[in-house]
Image: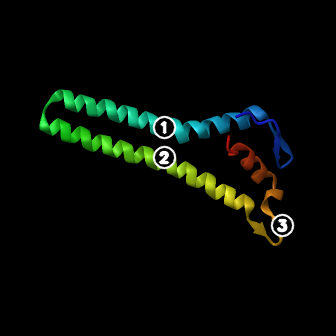
Amino acid sequence: MLILSSCSIGGVPIPDYILNSISYLIDFIKIGIPLLLIIFGMIDLAKGVVAKKEEDMKKCQQLFVKKLIAGAMVFFVISITIFLLKMLDSAETNGRRTNDYEALKCIQEIIKEH
């Protein structure tokens, strides 16, 4: 996602490439980390199956389940955080919408859905 509008916080403009980098980093954390955990968990599980020992298979199964849970937690923590930031952005404060504030406008640009 390329962000074309620039933000400024406290009157200091933030370059677009920084906003784009943050957006890509959030996407990687949200999608890439859980995928990597699942892939590495599958490799560990395959090692346990090849070992053909009951102990090793159980250890590898437990490790795989832990990695699946960790991957789901990473995905949902990022998703919930984005949801809460969107809720904060749409909230009203004393009759004024909070998106009047510069920092929330920048956050809105960064987490904008593709």
Q: Which residue is mark 3?
A: 96
In this view, which residue lies farthest toward the right? 11
Packing grade of label 3 (10 A; few <14, some 14-19, many >=20) is few
46 relative to 71, above or below: above
Q: Answer whether labels 1 and 2 touch (C-beta < 8 Å).
A: yes
Q: Which residue is mark 1?
A: 33
Residue 65 percent coordinates (x, y):
32, 45
73 relative to 87, above or below: above
Packing grade of label 2 (10 A; few <14, some 14-19, many >=20) is some
Find numbered disc 1 in the image and state the secondary structure of the residue it sits on. helix
In this view, which residue lies farthest toward the front? 114
On the picture, is 17 further left or further right than 28? right
Find numbered disc 2 in the image and state the secondary structure of the residue it sits on. helix
Find numbered disc 3 in the image and state the secondary structure of the residue it sits on. strand
Q: Amino acid at mark 2?
A: Val
Q: Which residue is mark 2?
A: 74
Q: Amino acid at mark 1?
A: Ile
N-term-proximal mark, 1 vs 2: 1
113 relative to 18, above or below: below
